[in-house]
Amino acid sequence: MALQANLPPTYLYELFWNSRGTGSKSFPGLIGELCKKHKLDFLAILETRTGGEKARRIAKRLGFTNFEIVDAQGYSGGIWVLWNDDSWKFEILGTHDQFVHVCLDIRTQRTFFIAVYAHPNPIKQRVVWRALLDISNTVTGPWCIGGDFNATLHMHDRHSFSRTGSCVDRDFSEWVSNMNLLDMGCKGPFFTWRRNGCESRLDRILVNSDFMLTYLNASVVHLPFLKSDHHPLWLRLNSEEARPNHREVPFRFVASWTLHENFESFVRDSWNVETNWLENMA
């Protein structure tokens, strides 16, 4: 495991959003405004609630050159991923009722993305957790999984006036641990879903350590509510703060670094260099 990062020079913008339907007349205009304001290169729309020819007819009106559709089951679920080939080389690696697996080539760097809409039923969720775990064994390099997981990781991810209180979704928590995934965190409102006095962080972006090391300036912003009761998640692989004329770089630390056989000597030698430099300046 190398103790240095490889940062491709790119400013890719992606959006993951549970829209709770795509059939309204205003929907194409709304997507157009999102794309214009946030310069979207890739869009994942979740819980589309449409399928067949109707879904494809709507998707063609959203302004992207390419798209992949997972049809809704009746009036439930559905995933669309849309992108422009003139900017980036995307490849669909596989689809499932609850996710779409995508590969992106940035120069010599292959990065993998999965757009997820996990079924609210915990039994059906376990199917997708197992499927993604199997995929993880075949993928090497930066990996990002984003969308609506319909599950929470921590007690503070839920807020409700219910007397029964909140609990952690253990299957989801164990899956995240087994996959060695890290939460990207967020800017903006913490809770991503709200209804009838209840709030939860159901939507999030999870990545592996390779992703964190490759895209050091990546950030996630929770955009304001639109027509849905879910906040859109705006992923910037290089945030505005990472522009070449900006000197400030956020500090990132991955716990697995401490397992590297040369970690202690690397830190000690680096610290000594800094200390000697300060002494010589005194």
Image (tube, rainbow, N blue to C red):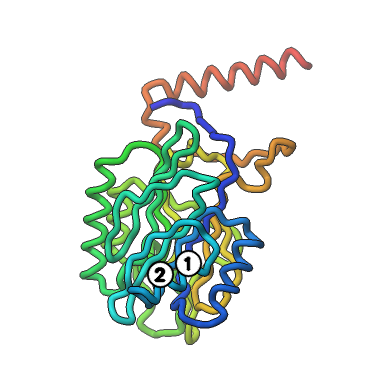
* Residue 18 vs residue 277, the one in the foreground: 18
Quadrant of residue 149 within the rendered picture: bottom left
- The 10 Å Cα crowd at callout 2, few under 14, some 14 to 19, many 20 or more, is some
Q: Which residue is mark 1?
A: 60
The residue at the point 34 percent across, 53 percent down is 101
Name the residue rendered at 32%, 49% in the picture.
93
Left or right: where 281 falls relative to 95: right
Where is residue 73 drawn, in percent x and y?
28, 76
Q: Position of residue 22 (x, y in %)?
A: 46, 76
Q: Is residue 176 visible?
A: yes
**Residue 159 seen in the current view:** no
Q: Residue at x 55, y 59 (%)?
A: 234
The type of residue carrying mark 2 is Arg
In depth, the one of 47 and 51 nearer the eye is: 51
Residue lying furthest right in this view?
282
The total of numbered circles placed on residues is: 2
Q: Is residue 272 above or below residue 172?
A: above
Q: Is residue 12 above or below residue 60?
A: above
- Helix, strand, or loop for circle 1? helix
Q: Is residue 20 above or below residue 152?
A: below
Q: Position of residue 125 (x, y in %)?
A: 26, 66
Quarter of the figure that contains the C terminus: top right
* Quadrant in the rendering for residue 29: bottom right
On screen, residue 236 versus residue 82, left or right, reads: right
CB within 8 Å, label 2 to label 1: yes
Counting from the top left corner in percent of width and height, residue 48 is at 41, 73
Q: Amino acid at mark 1?
A: Lys
Towards the viewer: 12 or 271: 12
Q: Nearer the viewer, residue 117 or 2?
A: 117
Name the disc covering residue 56, or none: 2
**Element at label 2:** helix
